[in-house]
Image: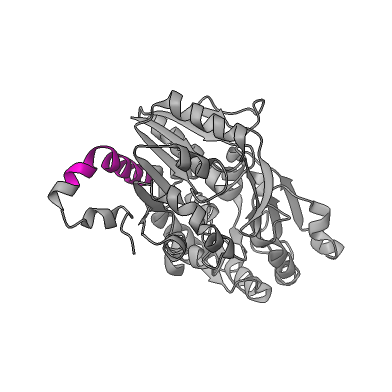
Amino acid sequence: MRIGIVCPYAWDVPGGVQFHVRDLAEHLIRLGHEVSVLAPADDDTPVPPYVVPAGRAVPVPYNGSVARLTFGFLSAARVRRWLHDGSFDVLHIHEPVTPSLSLLTCWAASGPIVATFHTSNPRSRAMVAAEPIMQPALEKISARIAVSEYARRTLVEHFGGDAVVIPNGVDVGFFARAEPRPEWSGADVADGGTIGFVGRINEPRKGLPTLLEALPRIIAARPGVRLLVAGRGDEEEAVKGLPAEVRARIEFLGMVSDEEKAALLRSVDLYVAPNTGGESFGIILVEAMSASAPVLASDLDAFRQVLDGGAAGELFPVENAEALADAAIRLLGDPERLAELREAGSRHVRRFDWETVGADILSVYETVTTGAAAMVSEDPGGGWRARLGLARD
């Protein structure tokens, strides 16, 4: 099958959507499909052979973060050329309502189109205002996928219709096979242990300030504890105002490779996700569980779903540093509970492996390319449309 995938966000800036698109493309290529990904990137940006750069991205505030998008005449021309040259059997457009390549492609494309919705933002005034512009593009979509129930709810509330829920995928084996690093492991678990955090340091919704607020209490109870922080951002600004003895227990690792991230997650005694909102899924939680890291996360709707309602990881109230500290102290002092979380997470995470997720996505591709006509004839009432997220309210 010839598959065209559109990524709306800058290819060279780490993010959940970019990682999902990359891993999906590589999974499909391993299965023997021909895949081309169109993504915002300068012509001189290093990209894999399957990625076609669509021009420079510009930073735009979006959903509590900064998205790097590309739009305009040059990008529109590259979209048309890519569509013409690709002769795709199916297009898979991610975040089709984002004012970037995804929306441009929806406007320009014809034929079978699958769209994945990643955003969870049920109160977006911008989405409400943009609905008249977005609706003609959305009507061209053959099938809709949402990465979580909360992303599906956002779609339904703003644009009507429905979507099938297929979660983000992770190469579970890649994280499970990683080797722990001695320098990142707890030297004296009885007195401390290691806590891991992965995310952009200066992005408030990733929640590092909440974790840093909790750290003095954790250190008071467990003097040997260390916090390992992986991600880009202003390290000095992040720890400004913290006592020297607290700063000494924090190690900033900067940007890490995928291999280093997997090793980090395999090494820590506890992974903490203190995010404050704007999350539709929680891919880092899946990666942590894949690496057998016990997870402690803020009680966001999306995180609760990923953690099986709290059965595969523990939850604390959002932005509650005191509750975070209490939970971290209790867990680090309870090796049996940590072992239970490792086991529960390792079992639960199998549902997110690419072997499962990729097969579900391919089923949608095959349905929209070859099965729609047969389904219509067999089901004149139109029930198949609802199953693919095409039913209108």
The verdict on residue 369 being magenta is: yes
- Identified at 34% across, 48% down, the residue is 143
In percent of width and height, residue 60 lies at 67, 50
Would residue 218 appear left or right of 104 to someone viewing this image?
Answer: right
| Image quadrant containing the N terminus | top left
In percent of width and height, residue 188 lies at 67, 58
The verdict on residue 393 being magenta is: no
Based on the displayed image, in which of its 4 quarters is residue 227 positioned?
bottom right
In the picture shown, does residue 195 fall above or below 110?
Answer: below
Instruction: Characterize the magenta stretch by its predominant secondary structure.
Output: helix
- Identified at 49% across, 33% down, the residue is 37
Based on the displayed image, in which of its 4 quarters is residue 54 positioned?
top right
Task: Decide which of 27, 151 is in the foreground and name it.
Answer: 151
In the picture shown, does residue 99 fall above or below 127?
Answer: above
In percent of width and height, residue 319 lies at 65, 71
Task: Decide which of 61, 313 is in the foreground and name it.
Answer: 61
Q: Which residues are magenta?
A: 355-375
Would residue 251 appear left or right of 72 to someone viewing this image?
Answer: right
In the picture shown, does residue 27 fall above or below 202?
Answer: above
